Amino acid sequence: MNERARPELKKVIEAPGPVITISRECGCSGRILAENLTGRINQKIDNPSKNWKWVNKEILSLASKELKINPDQIKNFLDAEDKNFIDEIVSSFTVKYYAPDAKIKKAIKDVVRHIAINGNVVIIGRGSEALTQDIQRSLHVKLYAPLSWKIDAIRMRDNISKEDARRFVVNTDKRRLKFVDSYLAKEDNKVVYDIDFNCSKFNQDEIIDMIMKAIEYKSII
């Protein structure tokens, strides 16, 4: 995790992966699922050196180190709703250096690819499902739920009004979808996910049980 995120400079001898990506709609917890899933996977592994890990915000930290910029700028890039966010960053932060969005996007891509190629990892979001489509030993999971369910989940989690929760859910889902689409090749009917789970119908343990079956069928572990 502390290595520089330059997969193109590393000669990969073995097949890349394995990797599991988790994409989630707002209100569907990917962090808890990833943490519990890696725990379940590691119970089946005899060699501790082959243990799996899960990553999320660490990707932003590594990308910011690569660019030598404030990590908050990476976060703002992911949260931005339009291309004018650079101007806001310049006026809001005191860092001497800021990177254009294309450079930030490439840094995130390099970090995700590097982590995925090294394998034995569950990656949450960050466009990982689009960036690892070519890795054969991979499974791409999508967590979704009805809008009303997601609104209730965010309303209870953040103790905010129903209207504020609705606005947050809609805007967050829109930004995440836009970010993933920016990494996809311009193809019609592009299939990204291998398996989708409705979080309003299945609890965390049930979802993990089904993912474990899927990765066994695909010989990922």
Image (cartoon, rainbow, N blue to C red):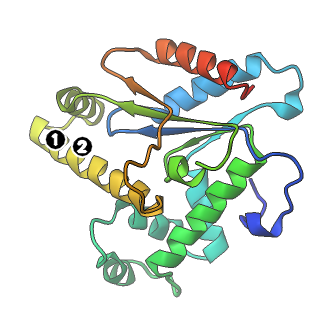
What is the three-letter code of the residue carrying label 2? Val
Q: Residues within 10 Å of mark 1 (few under 14, many from 20)?
A: some
Q: Which mark is residue 169?
A: 2
Q: Is residue 198 above or below residue 180?
A: above
In the image, taking residue 207 as reference, residue 88 lies left or right, namely: left
Q: Quadrant of residue 160?
A: top left
SS for callout 1: helix
SS for callout 2: helix
In the image, taking residue 121 as reference, residue 210 lies left or right, namely: left
Look at 61% across and 76% down and name the residue there: 67
Spot occupied by residue 37 in the image (x, y as percentages of width and height): 60, 24
Q: Which residue is mark 1?
A: 166
Q: Which mark is residue 124?
A: none
Extreme residue toward the bottom, this view: 96
Say if mark 2 contacts mark 1, CB within 8 Å. yes
Q: Is residue 60 visible?
A: yes
In the image, taking residue 8 as reference, residue 187 lies left or right, namely: left
Spot occupied by residue 15 in the image (x, y as percentages of width and height): 81, 45
Q: Is residue 100 above or below residue 147?
A: below
Q: Is residue 70 visible?
A: no
Q: Is residue 81 above or below residue 208?
A: below
Toward the viewer: 63 or 180? Answer: 180
Q: Quadrant of the C terminus?
A: top right
The count of marks equals 2
Look at 21% across and 28% down and name the residue there: 152
